[in-house]
């Protein structure tokens, strides 16, 4: 089976559409696995939820998904994120809200756990250091765990009791060692590469292939200007940070 691993679409329809077009050009997948933050920051929350729901998919909840439906308080957000969250909430339909409410915090499929932040703290924790990654291996039972939230591609490998950080390259062969994997962000990459980031998992081959996809950044930015979304959120898309 083949799965597309997507995370942090963040209401960026142009980026999401570009990723889906790229996926199609590569022969498609059986299912999308979305690691949360479908909305927040960007200009097309309703459209991104609709497009995701039009695909065969699984999705877990992210902090922005929860904040927009009032499950968590935006006082934990910075000012720009909180402003975008209020705007996002005003754009959701009742059906969007019901869908977001239905999202689980954590999912398990075969050898894979799917979660937004971390298995220990699905909504809030960022796994950005090997110490955090090492702690988190105790909080999931499968061999592999896909996470999002940091919008940066990386891999943490557990070799005996040592956690080894790695960059997520183009091809990652899944072997015996347990891994925490982040495939980067679709709608707001933060690794200084402005292109959308995602991966295709082939469970028969035991192979994860990581891709970057250029998209019409200006189209998203123009919509954000028209919606009076915060300037910092608009400008960061150009640099991917
Ligand atoms: Zn996010």
Image (cartoon, helix red, strand yellow):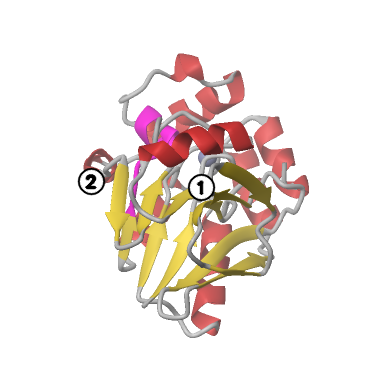
Quadrant where the N terminus is found in the figure: bottom left
Query: Does residue 70 sit above or below 159 in this rendering?
Result: above
Is 87 left or right of 114, judged from the image as shown?
Answer: right
Q: Is residue 69 magenta?
A: no
Q: Is residue 16 visible?
A: yes
What residue did someone put label 2 on? 95
x and y, in percent, of residue 82 in the image: 51, 23
Mark 1 and ligand 1: say if the CB distance to the nearest ligand atom is below 8 Å: yes
Residue at 68% across / 40% down in the picture?
Answer: 234
Of 234 and 156, the residue lying toward us: 156
Left or right of 153? Residue 93 is left
Q: x, y (%) of residue 232?
A: 70, 32
The quadrant in which the C terminus is found is top right
Measured from the top left, where is residue 164 in percent x and y? 64, 47
Of helix, strand and loop, which one carries label 2? helix
- For the point 37% across and 37% down, which residue is it? 139
- Badge 1, how many Cα within 10 Å: few under 14, some, many 20+? many
Q: Nearer the viewer, residue 174 or 182?
A: 174
Which numbered disc flags the more N-terminal residue, 2 or 1?
A: 1
Quadrant of residue 90 within the rendered picture: top left
Residue 100: x %, y % from top left: 29, 42
Residue 151 visible in the shown view: no
Q: Is residue 66 magenta?
A: yes
Q: Which residue is mark 1?
A: 8
Q: Which residues are magenta?
A: 59-67
């Amino acid at each position: 089976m083949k799965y597309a691993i997507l995370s942090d679409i963040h209401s960026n329809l142009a980026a999401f559409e570009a990723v889906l077009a790229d996926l199609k050009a590569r022969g498609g997948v059986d299912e999308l696995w979305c690691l949360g933050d479908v909305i927040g920051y960007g200009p097309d929350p309703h459209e991104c939820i609709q497009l995701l729901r039009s695909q065969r998919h699984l999705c877990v909840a992210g902090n922005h998904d929860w904040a927009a439906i009032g499950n968590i308080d935006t006082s934990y957000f910075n000012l720009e994120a909180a402003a975008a969250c209020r705007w996002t909430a005003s754009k959701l339909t009742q059906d969007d809200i019901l869908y977001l409410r239905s999202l689980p915090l954590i999912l398990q499929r075969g050898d894979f756990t799917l979660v937004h932040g971390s298995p220990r703290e699905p909504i809030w924790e960022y796994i950005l250091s090997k110490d955090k990654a090492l702690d988190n291996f105790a909080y999931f039972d499968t061999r592999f765990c896909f996470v999002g939230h940091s919008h940066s591609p990386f891999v943490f490998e557990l070799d005996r009791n040592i956690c080894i950080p790695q960059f997520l390259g183009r091809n990652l062969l899944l072997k015996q060692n347990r891994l925490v994997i982040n495939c980067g962000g679709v709608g707001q990459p933060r690794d200084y590469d402005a292109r959308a980031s995602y991966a295709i998992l082939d469970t028969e081959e035991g192979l994860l292939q990581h891709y970057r996809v250029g998209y019409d950044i200006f189209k998203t930015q123009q919509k954000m200007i028209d919606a009076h979304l915060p300037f910092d959120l608009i400008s960061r898309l150009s640099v991917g940070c």
